[in-house]
Structure formats: C-alpha cells, structure tokens
Image (cartoon, rainbow, N blue to C red):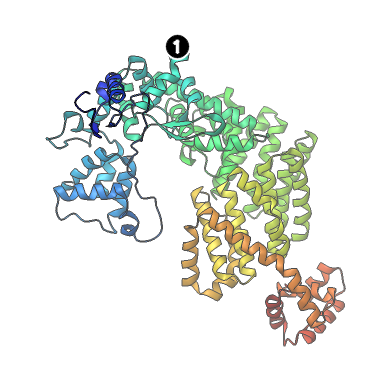
Amino acid sequence: AAAIRPGDLLLVLDNFEHIVAAAPFVADVLAVCPQLTVLVTSRAALRVGGEREFPGTPLAWPAPALGRAVDRTTNSPAVRLFVGRARSVDPKFALTDENAPAIAAICARLDGLPLAIELAAARVRLFPPAALLTRLGRRLPLLTDGRRDRPERHQTMRDAIAWSCDLLADEAARIFRGLSVFVGGFTLGDAEATVGAAESASFALHVEALIDGSLLRRIDDGGDAGPRLAMLETVREFGREQLAARGEADAALDAHAAHFLALAETFARELAGPDQRWWLARLDAERPNLRAAYIRFRDRGRAEEALRLVAALGGLRLRRGQMPEGWPERDAALAMPADPGLTAMRARALVVGSLAAEQLTERAAAHALGEQALAAYRMLDDAAGVASARRALGGITINRGDFDDAERLLDAARAALEAAGAAAGVGQALDDRGGAACARGGCAGAGALFEAGLACQREAGDAHVIGVSLDKAACLALIRGEHIRAATDAEALALHLELGSGWDLGWVLAGFAGLAAAAGETERAARLFGAAAERFAAERVPLRPSLAAVFDRLLEPAWFAMGSARFAAAQEAGRALSLEDALADVEIVRRRMAEIPRRASRAASRYGLTPRETDVLRLLAVGKTNREIAKALFITHRTAEAHVAHLLTKLGAANRTEAAAIAGREGLA
C-alpha cells in the first residue's frame, strides 16, 4: 500500500472467489490509496464499501426469426464464439444456412455459457452441429476435454460448476441441490415451500449466497409474487446429478409435485375472480413446473394426483390454448387403471379432455371423451356434472354437423344450469347455441343468442369469457357484412390485452384482417392474418376448419387482388410482426372503418339514395337475393325488386355486380 499510494493505478485481482474472505484487505488498501482503482473478477461479490457490481451475463444467442439463417446468427456473440472455436479444431468449418439453426440451438441449450460453448464446439471434429445438438440432451458428459494449458477447473463444465459449489456452506449446498428440481424458474415462496431451511430465517440468506456464487440468477421481478429466480440449465443438470448421488431426489421431486398441485387447485378456485390477470400470468410462468409435476404423478402411478392436476388446469387450457401437461400425457393419465373411488375426479378430467381434444380438432376423441364423462356423471347421479358434460358434448357435436343433437344437448344443459343458478355455464350454453344457429345459416337468431350469452357472462364476471363472447358477436357481425359494428367494439381487445392471451388476440387480429380486406387494405389484411396465425401456432391450437373457411372467404378479395405469391409473402411478414406493430395496423383499420359512415353519407347524398335504398344496397353488396333482402328488411319481395331497380338507375350500374363494386368503392357497403 505504501509503495503504490502515490500513483494513479489500476489493480486487477482475477478469480477472487476462493479467497473472498480477504475482501477486507482490498478495502484497507483502497482506504490508504485514494487514487487506486481495483478491478476484481469473482463468482461472488466482495461486499465492501464502494463496490460496484457489473454482472457477467451469458453470451447472447439468436432468437428464431424470418430470413436467411446465416443473416440472423452472424451477429450473435455466442455463435461467433462457437464458430471461432470450431475453426481452431477444423479449419474448414464454416457457418452456413444449413448448419446455422443447429448452432443457434446449441448455444441456446448451453445457456450462452462461453466455457460450455467452447467445449461443445471442440467436438465438431467428430459431430456436425445437427448431430452434436442431439447429443446435448444431457450436457455435462459431452462438455469435457478442455485445453491443457487451462486450470483444472476449466477442463470440464462439471469441474467449473463444482468449483463454485465447493465454496458453499453445507446448508446452502443442500438448498442448491433441492432447487435443481424446478423447471423454468421459481419464486422465493416456491423455493421455501419445497426446499426450506433448517432455520427459516436463514433461508433467504442462503439463496442470496447462491445468487452471489452465480449458481442462481434473477430472471424478472415477478410482480406481486416476488422476484423470479432460475438456474442455467447446465447448472441445473449438475444439481440434479448431485441430488441423485446423495439419495435426495425422490423426496425433492415429491415435494415439488405436491406444491404445484396445490398451486393449480388454488388457481382453479381463483380463476374467475378479480385477480384473474395475476393468476393467469403466474400460471403461464409455471407451465414447465406444472408439466414436471404431472410427469412425476404419472410415472409414479399416482392416478389421484394426476387427475386432480388435469382437472384443475382445465381453465388454463380454455384460456391459453396449450395445457401444460400436453395432449399425450393427458391421455396417459386418463388411461390409468380405473378406481371406483376416483370416478368423480376422472369425470372432471374427461370433460377437460374432451374440450382439449375439440380445440385440437381431434373430433372423434373429443366426442368419445365427452360421452365417457356423461356416463360417469350419470352413474354418480351428479346433476351439475351431467349438465357440464352435456354442454361440452353440445359444442363438440356442432362441429360434427349434427345440429339437432347439439341443440338438444345444449338446451338440456342450459335448463339444468339455470336451475342451479350457474350464470357462467348458462352463458356458455347460449354461446354454443348461437354457434349452432350460425352454422345452420340462421345468423339473425345467432345474434340474439350471443347477446343473451354475453349478458350471463357479465353477470358471472369472468373477464376472459366476456371477451370470448364479444369475439363471437364481432365475428357474426363480420360474416353479416356489418363491418362498422365489428370494428368499433374495442372492449374485447382491451380485455385480451389485459389478460395477455395470445390465442384470443389471434382471434382479434384475424377479425381485423377480414375488416382490412373489406376496406381494400389488401397488404394489411394479409399481414394481420399472418400475425393472427402466429398467435394460434404459438399456443399450438389449430384454427377449426369451419372458421378457417370463414376467414378464407373474408380474405378472398385481398388474395385475388394481390395474387397468391404476394399474399403469401405479406402473410409471412405478418408472422414476424411484434404485437405492438400488429396493433398499430389494427388501429389504422379501425380509423378507416370509423370514416366509412361519413363517406357513405356523402356518397348517398351525391347519388340521391334514400336511407332505405342504402340499406338495400348494403345487402345487395354482400350477395343477398331480392327475397333475402325482403326478409332481412321486413318488406315485400315486390318492394325489394323496385328498390334494386331504382338503385341500378341512380348508380348508373348495368347489373348487381357493378352496383356492389360502386358500393364498395364509395363506402356504401
């Protein structure tokens, strides 16, 4: 200190974590040498006055995107490191469009950790990137044989992680092993409930030590649930190895599964309440943990817990599309040996399964599961359960084209649900009846049913289901050519944005794609439909064939105007749109639609059209015959014919097709 005190110097202390107890020495030197700056590299903070931390984060790797694979990976630090290390062992190695996706996936699987990437890249002498990726299911056995001139702790990835773990106190090391059972992260509350500590007051201190030692990292603030923490996957794999080696795995996995079953059942109770947004966000974050809990129950043959979890998470599937435990695993749960004591639980899971299969357009499976649920509830003499199974079956039967049977099931369900005072169930039954009426071609009747269903949903107060009911009403307005009405209802969009449902936002974007096509905004229509398709794909729920046909018909004008190649290119561009950009397109369409009444009023005045003639023209423009126009406007067929004749004269149109074209151009339809 005396020797360096006069100088304006930088002192570098590298790899300090194993002597971090000497931190007071650094503080003492700084106190004596006011012009000295100390740069310390360490896996643990020194915790002395004046210290400023600069966390060393993993190298960034490329996210999936449109465009050439090389273009989107070249600027990635992780990929550049991989390619550079690969070339040091194989000078002919090159980044190409063919191997770039595999290299990007390798970097992601290795969490962007430089040492792990270097050790993996050294293997390209034996394995091309695609083959190397398949061998990284377990990372640590492959990440060995580092350079001989490096310290021993950098020879293998396992040694590098073990170096940090060996610096932990025994209780912190035990907590580290226990936390390795979490998948995709956890809150401090989750950790304490499943792992705990010998003294609960010290638990947070031990977790903080793991963060200081770079064995845990904070991934977001977590909102009301508190900060969300996670292990890098390579570190988590090491923790699981240590957990198994010490015989602690079974107890830790059982505690994890029990905790997330309890969380799922709390979610099921709270779902329709005032904190719906918070619960949906929490359950979205916990999907990987919920799936892991399900797999634990399934693989241990614990049918009761598996069925409870499936039943509890039914609401998440209906609101988010993809259920955490997935389609094959749910089948495995329902196929577990029957137990008379589990009949009620199995019946609830069967209803969830039938609705899940219907979302995935697995119609035969959906119907079979629904029938099994109905039979189980009848055996239990459970009237509420019978009503829920009938309602599910009714919705499924609509898509099979058996409208009479669907309406019979839905009417019976509605009567039972009304008697039980279940407003939400009544609303869903009415919505499905509206769907049946629409599928039959009775759009006028469907509108009244949708409105009645929406009133019930408002009474029940479930924000998500209110949004879905509004979506159905807007879709009906779109089909009927009531474009302004479809465009001006902003409530559904606001609800879906608040609740953060990509699947439901896909519905809104698809609807505005149809509106854009009707307004002549062809490029925007294709782009918005691409954005909608991306949201559906993200939730792994296909658009039902009947609805796909509706949107095909609505977008047909844009497809013809642009040609198939341009339309497809614009749709692909839409898939890459951020939600913010997609909503900017929605707002443009909404403003254009808001201008239509003013344009229509000016055009009607210019052509000398009466209000009744304007109504007739709107119906004519969407292809209605004279008889259909008469029926819709409650006038005689002869009066409708007279109105059409007058219209053609006033517009100077040779036929109905010309009149429809003028109506579209002038904003009269």
- The structure residue drawn at horizontal position 85% and vertical position 77%, both measured from the top left corner, is 610
- The structure residue drawn at horizontal position 73% and vertical position 52%, both measured from the top left corner, is 434
Give, as a three-letter code, the residue at label 1.
Answer: Glu
Which residue matches tag 1?
199
**Which is more toward the observer, 655 or 17?**
17
Secondary-structure class at tag 1: loop
| Quarter the N terminus occupies | top left
Question: Vertical placement of 350 versus 5: above or below?
Answer: below
| Quarter the C terminus occupies | bottom right
Give the tally of numbered discs: 1
Q: Which image quadrant is residue 24 in?
A: top left
- The structure residue drawn at horizontal position 79% and vertical position 87%, both measured from the top left corner, is 649
The spot of residue 444 in percent (x, y) is 78, 60
Q: Which image quadrant is residue 605 in?
A: bottom right
Name the residue at the front extreme. Answer: 6
The spot of residue 356 in percent (x, y) is 56, 43
Asked whether residue 208 appears in the rendered view, the answer is yes
**Which is more toward the observer, 563 or 217?**
217
From the viewer's perspective, tell me whether residue 326 is left or right of residue 13: right
Question: Vertical placement of 465 versus 297: above or below?
Answer: below
**Which is more toward the observer, 28 or 331?**
28
- Crowding at dot 1, Cα within 10 Å, few <14 / some 14-19 / many 20+, comes out as few
The spot of residue 229 in percent (x, y) is 44, 31
Asked whether residue 302 appears in the rendered view, the answer is no
From the viewer's perspective, tell me whether residue 129 is left or right of residue 629: left
The spot of residue 557 in percent (x, y) is 59, 72
Question: Vertical placement of 120 versus 613: above or below?
Answer: above
Name the residue at the top extreme. Answer: 199
From the viewer's perspective, tell me whether residue 135 is left or right of residue 421: left
From the viewer's perspective, tell me whether residue 58 is left or right of residue 614: left
